[in-house]
Amino acid sequence: MRWRENLLEKVGALTTAVLLALYVQSQLHPVIERTYEVPIELINTPQNYEVRLESSPRARVILRGVKELVEQTRAEQIRASVDLSRAKPGENRLAIRLDYPIEWREQLTVTPERPVVRVTLEPRLSRQFPVRVNLTGIPELQEVLAEAVPEPASVRVSGAASQVRRVRAVQINFDMTGLQGDLELEMAPTPIDERGEPVMGVQIAPAEVRLKVRLIPQPTSRTVPVSPRLDDLPPFPYRVIWFSVEPVSVQLRGSPARLAQINVIETAPISLRNKTSDAEMRVPLKPPPGVEILGAREVTVRVRIQREAQPEPTRPKPPAESETQSQPKEDA
C-alpha cells in the first residue's frame, strides 16, 4: 500500500508538526501559576470554646492555568474555610475547603498549599479584674501629688482558659513627664502575668477605659517633732529623772509622698554610760532617707541625773530599861 511508503519520514513530520503546534500554543497562551493568601474562615464553631489555629490564620492558594484566565482572577473570589462541627476539645487536624467560581473548575487548577491545618479547641473562661494604674515620670508642675482614676474601675478578661489563668493584673502605664495640668484620655489596659509580661490572645471588655489624671497641689515641707535617742543609761545607782530637747521640732523638705510617711525625727544615739551628774550636749539629727532638714542639723539635749537614795542598813534595837533591871544579877 502506498501510504506505507516513507512511513518513518511521515511519522517524523507529524511529530514535528505537533511539537511545533504545542510550542506556538505555549507562546500564544502560556500556562502560569499565581499564589493568593486568603483568610481562613472558621465555621460551626462550638459555643463556650476558644479556637486557635496553630499556624498562620491565612491560607496560601495556588492557581494554575492559561495566562489570560489566571490574570483575570482575584483573591476576593476565593473562600477558604474549616468546618469545626466534628472537632473535639484539644488538638484537631482538619481539612481546608476552598470555594471559588464554578467556571474555574474546567479552566483552572486551584489547590491549597497546605490542605490540612491544626486547630486547638479550649474551654473559654471569663474573669473580672480591677484596672491598676502605674504612673511614671515627673510632671512639669512642681509640688503636686498625681492621682489617676480609671473609668470603669474594672474590666472583664475573656479567652482560652489557660491564657486567662495566666493573668494576674490588668494595668495601664502612663508617663507624666512634662504634664502641665489635669488630663482625660482613652487608653487600652494591658493584661499582665506574674512577671509583668503582657498576656496575648485574650480579649478585654471594654477594650478601652477613660483615664482621669489630676495634679493636686501639695506642700513639699513638713514640721515634725524631735525625739532624743537615749541608748546607754547612767551606771547604777544613777538614773535619768528629766530630759529636754531644743528646738523641739524641725522642718523637713521632700516629696509629698515621702513626707507623709514621717511622723518624728530622731537624734543620733546618745550614750550616758559614764554620766553621774546633769549634762548638756549638742547632738546631730539623723535625717530619714529621701528628705533633707531645713535649718540647723543639731539640737541641744539637757539631761538631769540623780542618785537613787539607798536604804540604811537595819540596826538591832537596844534593850529596854525595864528589861535590864529585871534581869538577875550574877553572883559575885
Image (spheres, helix red, strand yellow):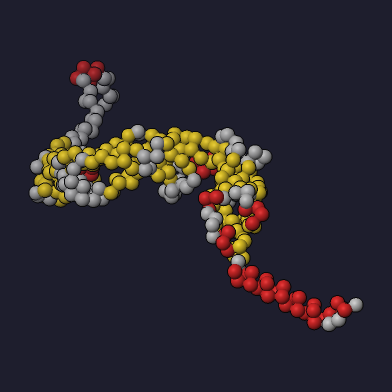
Name the foreground residue: 131 vs 25: 25
Q: Which quarter of the figure is the N terminus placed in?
A: bottom right
Q: Measured along the vertical axis of the image, is residue 324 above or below residue 248?
A: above
The image quadrant that residue 182 belongs to is top left
Q: Tell me what residue is drawn at x 38 percent, y 42 percent.
A: 189
Q: Residue at x 35, y 34 (%)?
A: 153
Viewer-nearest residue: 101 or 200: 101
- Left or right of residue 152: residue 38: right
Q: Quadrant of residue 72?
A: bottom right
Q: Position of residue 165 (x, y in %)?
A: 51, 41
Q: Nearer the viewer, residue 16 or 119?
A: 16
Judge left or right: residue 270 versus residue 132. left
Q: Residue at x 60, y 71 (%)?
A: 27
Q: Is 24 left or right of 239, judged from the image as shown?
A: right
As displayed, is residue 237 above or below residue 69?
Answer: above
Q: Residue at x 63, y 42 (%)?
A: 83
Apparent side of residue 307 relative to residue 46 in the rendered image (left or right): left
Outermost residue on the front side: it is: 2
The quarter of the rendered structure image containing the C terminus is top left
Q: Residue at the far right: name it.
A: 1
Picture coordinates of residue 136 (x, y %)? 28, 48
Q: Can you give x and y, in whole percent of width and height, for residue 130 in the image?
A: 39, 36
Q: Quadrant of residue 16?
A: bottom right
Q: Position of residue 175 (x, y in %)?
A: 28, 49
Task: Please tell me whether residue 70 is drawn above or below residue 215 in the rendered image.
Answer: below
Decide if residue 283 is in sight here: no
Q: Is residue 128 visible?
A: yes
Is residue 331 or residue 100 the one in the foreground? Answer: 100
